[in-house]
Amino acid sequence: MSRLMVGVSGVRGEIAKTLTPEVAVAFGSAFGTMLGAGKSVVVGRDSRPSGSMVRNAVTSGLAACGVDVIHLGVVSTPGVALMTRHLQADGGIVLTASHNPLEWNGIKFLRPNGLGLGAQQAEQLKTMWESGNFAYVGATQCGGESANTQTHAIHIQAVLDIVKAKDIARRGFKVVLDSINGAGCTATAELMERLGCEFVHLNGEPTGLFAHTPEPIAENLGALCEAVRQHNADIGFAQDPDADRLAMVDETGAFVGEEYTLAVCAAYVLSQQSAGGGSIATNLSTSRMIDDIAAAAGARVFRTPVGEVNVAERMLEAGCVFAGEGNGGVIDPRVVPVRDSLVGIALVLAHMTETGEPFSESIAKLPRYELMKTKFPCSAGAAGKLVGAVKKHFAGRRGVRLDDRDGLRVDLPSGWVHIRASNTEPIIRIFAEGRSRADAQALVADVRSVADAAAG
Ligand code: MG
């Protein structure tokens, strides 16, 4: 049985089951109450067929609290973040369930700078929603509605400004793009044209009728791999439904692990720093490739607890030149301080322009690691005990560094392992990385044996 998921990144549920019009009105009202009458909010949505229903309900709640709503229409998540900042709104709302299937939708709340709410604000919003005690205004003070259709144009220009677009266009890359009939369809097609690409667009109509399981991971991208081979393309790209994540397929039609999106983009951005140095922010579960790439460029890496907001906040605080997550989410603060697949596409093509080599060769030159991602059932209570036992197991060993800001990350000379309890399910996730698959497997086995002993 699915349930309404209320977390730091907003609320998600299944349409007509847990995410009903009533729930959407209540969350619009809670956010409107938090902001107060006279404020403004931009609202954009991904392409799901339920998008209009959720938008109308959320808008109703906001307007009832005296908040003006600026509708952006069907746009990407980074597009909403960018417009929230650009229009100097007091907040933003994205209606999307990201990579969840079509039956789902969600409401994500943004701060004026485009970042998602921090943990404290998210908790405040949840409490407000639970209380049902909303600050509705009188008849003459209800919020109004307006529309803004500039998101794609402004977003595309901001992305073009970070690369040498003419140099990329001169290469005339052949690209296959899978936009999963999501929010990225329109803007990304235009970006491709502006970058002079000859492109084949798979699932390029923003109908929200997802042609395959939406998460951009290897098992869902067989058709893209096939199309890259069939069309003799230079590269293939896949977006998720709200276009904040990006996966890649090389010119041979081989899926390139999602960890490589950040690695390639960061390597390119660091190579463009005239003064050298700079710094990168990423989470504790991201591949060590980024540390090697940064070290080679004389740059520093800041690790944060998992969660896009944590990474983005650190990026802004530390003045990082780039940031991102190993799930294919890259963040360039020059465009927008959230994950953006359009940024990823432009930077990868810029990298290919600069190297002039087939993409598979660029990938082969990157530091090589094997990252294993696994999980097992564990109650929230047992998770704390388990983390403690693993900490004890590794503490005091030679060359070992422990980081317990988010579960536990153990760095060893030969690799690392990160264990953390899920916020939404009674499971523990284990990420382990080594020079070989056997190294990574050995780390996972080590943690599992400690877990079994702790469970007694
Ligand atoms: Mg997404």
Image (tube, rainbow, N blue to C red):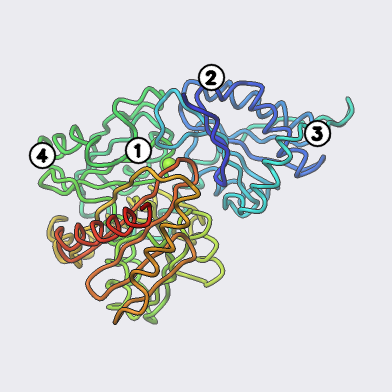
- Identify the residue at the far front of this view: 456
SS of the residue under disc 1:
helix
Residue on which the image places disc 3: 133
Q: Amino acid at mark 2?
A: Lys
Question: Is ligand 1 less than 8 Å from the beta carbon at label 3?
Answer: no
Instruction: Please name the residue that numbered disc 4 is placed on.
Output: 229
Read off the residue under disc 2.
17
> Of tags 4 and 2, which is closer to the observer?
2
Q: Are marks 3 and 4 in contact (CB under 8 Å)?
A: no
Q: Is residue 329 left or right of residue 119?
A: left
Residue corresponding to mark 1: 189
Looking at the image, residue 181 sits to the left or right of residue 103; the answer is left
**Label 1 or label 2, whichever comes before in sequence order:** 2
Disc 1 to disc 2: CB gap under 8 Å: no
Q: CA distance from mark 1 to mark 4?
A: 20 Å
Q: Earlier in the sequence, mark 3 or mark 2?
A: 2
Estimate how packed mark 4 is, as few (under 14), some (14 to 19) or many (20 or more) residues with alpha carbons within 10 Å: some
Q: Mark 3 or mark 1, which is nearer the start of the sequence?
A: 3
Q: Nearer the viewer, mark 1 or mark 4?
A: 4
Q: For mark 1, does the 10 Å Cα neighbourhood hold few (<14), some (14 to 19), or many (20 or more) residues?
A: some
Give the number of the mark in front: 1 or 2: 2
User: What amino acid type is highlighted by mark number 4?
Assistant: Arg
**SS label for mark 4:** helix
Where residue 73 appears, x then y in whole percent?
A: 55, 31
* Label 2 crowd (10 A; few <14 / some 14-19 / many >=20): few
